[in-house]
Amino acid sequence: MSGDRGGSSGGRARGGRRRRLKLVSAGLGLVLALAACGSSGQSKLPPADQALSQLAQALTELSLDRAPLVESAAAAQADLDEILKGMDDARPQVGPGQLVYDDNNASATGALLFDWTWPSGVWSYQSTVDLRYDGQDWRAVWSPSLIHPQLDASTRLVHRRLPAQRAGMVGDGGQPLIERYVVVHVGVDKTLVAPEQTESSARRLAELLQLDGDRLAERVAQAGPKAFVTAVTLRQSEVRPEILDIPGVRGIKDSALLGPKPNFMSEILGQIGTATADDIASSNGAVASGDQVGQSGLQRRYDDQLRGLAGDLVYLRDRSAPPAEADETPPAQAVLHQLDPIDGQTLELSFDPALQLKAESVLATVGPSAAAVLIRPSDGAVLAAAQSPAAQGQAEANYGRYAPGSTFKIVTTLALLRHGLTPDSPVQCSRTANAGGLTMTNYSGYPSSQLGRISLTAAVAHSCNTAFVNEISRLGDDDLAQAAGSLGLGIDYDAGAPVFYGLAPRADSTAMKGQEVIGQGGVLASPLAMAGVIASVAAGRTVVPWLVASARPSPTGAPLSETEAAQLRQVLQATVSYGAARSLQGVVQGAKTGTAEYGSGQPLPTHAWMVAYTDHDLAVAVWVHDGDSGSGVAGPLVRALLT
């Protein structure tokens, strides 16, 4: 490693720094020794700077056609190609250094400054080249040591990439969400079975694994005579003995990052896969063929953190030796440069794996698209966010955009409280109400006993639409949006993950305001956003739900006061005591039901909602795409989640 210049702009601190500094001293000593023979200022020879610069440029381009050489450019090029044969197409940046002249021999010695750049850092060193003056021009003497001081005619440079280990993901309290498992690649090894038996083995294997037998048999038939054809990759615990008893079938152990079950939280966490050509091309060298990269979700967004940074190793190797194996370990004395890989860093998330698995289990049998979110009000951590199979991989729990219907009356109630109403204030629950020419009604089946003059608490508990429409004259154009912001809804926060925190726009007409006070019109929310609304009520302050520990948003809306939250808890507790959510008595403390019309038809189809909080620091929101009532459709799912 003599001649190393030390220092590596853009590189990383490593234990090898001391070694490089020693080499800098060796390089400087060489320059000082050369300087004793003469200098450019004292020499009577013409300057050799141009020849040295031309040579440096030729080496940067790895093309010696026009290099000023004493020897044949073609012979030198062949030698250069041989030297760099194992360098994985890496190219150095070469610059000219100091020149020292020898007048007596019409020669000079020049320094060449090499920088090889990889994502792990820069390998920098210095070599020297002899130049001769023929009376007209300066020409360089070709030598392998010109590329690196320790090279000679029998050796070459070999580069090996040192892969980093991809990190997993952890949830609440450090519980693993995605971790490394021992897996087994199960397949047919054609070297272990007679050719005439490969098809029957493939079909038997496919039968046991419930795979397409024709497809596997065809893949095995088309593979080479010594091929191992992978049929499936299983966790080690999933490999049954009878699988490996099939002639020619064997398993190859490996490791892989997996969740507790297949496709666990894939809508949010995402998927990992082998790097594509586009991944490699756009990575500036950080990703190589065969690397595992994030393809979607948080795996993709935090790919740099999770993937880590590969290291690099360069060593001398005998040119006459057989080709190097990918995992070859060179002798220490042959190593010229090494930067070890930096393994990926674990991504810390909010999810509780047990609650997440339960939520997925509860929604697994729901026919329509549905989603559920559970939040811890004390700190806003999203403990579970799950979708039903009908969601078809869409992240409805955290990114769905749907009218929240009567669950939004929590927001409207806060806005009215801020205008002087109390939970006991009387409001008018009429059969119909007029909002700028738009006639509004209550839901089908609304109890007639609760019509007329009732309290604000009763209007929330029984979900009287007209009572809220009749109060819109109290509300300014921005009051709903400000109340929503106090409950964590309607402000676009950066959560470090795809999250829709809802939309509560300024109404552009009285008719629109009449719709928005009951969660229709331009109001939209995700289940996560509505879980945040009721979590704020439970916590007594504004709660902005978060998923990624390093990106926890801070609320920017007008603060929710404890007094306001206590009043909201009073009306939501009444909803459970004697209102529309009384089916959840004994399970939750406060709740709000909701249905929201959408689409077209007569009657209009509706989404079903239920939001609730418990006395053990949990808040939940459930949304079902097609449901005729929040209490009848979403309510049972809330009970199943919390019991």
Image (cartoon, rainbow, N blue to C red):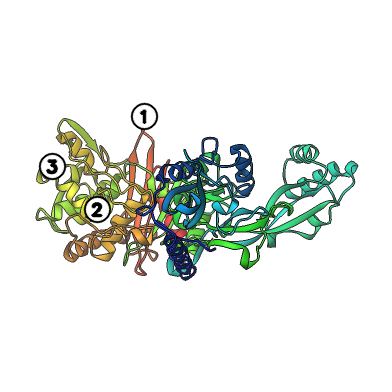
Q: Can residue 111 be seen in this view?
A: no
Three-letter amino acid code at the position of disc 2: Ile
Image location of residue 630, percent across then percent down: 37, 48
Q: Can residue 485 be seen in this view?
A: yes
Is label 1 in a helix, a strand or a loop? loop
- Identify the residue at horizontal 53%, vertical 63% (top origin): 2
Between the residue at mark 2 and the residue at mark 1, the CA separation in whole angstroms equals 27 Å
Depth check: give the residue in front, 113 or 436: 113
Three-letter amino acid code at the position of disc 3: Asp
- Give the quarter of the image for residue 511: top left
What residue does disc 3 label? 477
- Give the quarter of the image for residue 469: top left
Depth check: give the residue in front, 172 or 468: 172
Q: How crowded is mark 3: few (under 14 residues within 10 Å), some or many (20 or more)?
A: some
Image location of residue 254, percent across then percent down: 67, 59
Three-letter amino acid code at the position of disc 1: Ser
Depth check: give the residue in front, 104 or 554: 104
Looking at the image, residue 66 sits to the left or right of residue 216; the answer is left
Is label 3 in a helix, a strand or a loop? loop
Image location of residue 318, percent across then percent down: 69, 56
Looking at the image, residue 382 sits to the left or right of residue 140; the answer is left
- The label on residue 410 is 2
Q: Which of marks 3 and 1 is in front?
A: 3
Number of labelled discs? 3
Mark 2 or mark 3: whose residue is earlier in sequence: 2
- The label on residue 600 is 1
Mark 3 or mark 1: whose residue is earlier in sequence: 3
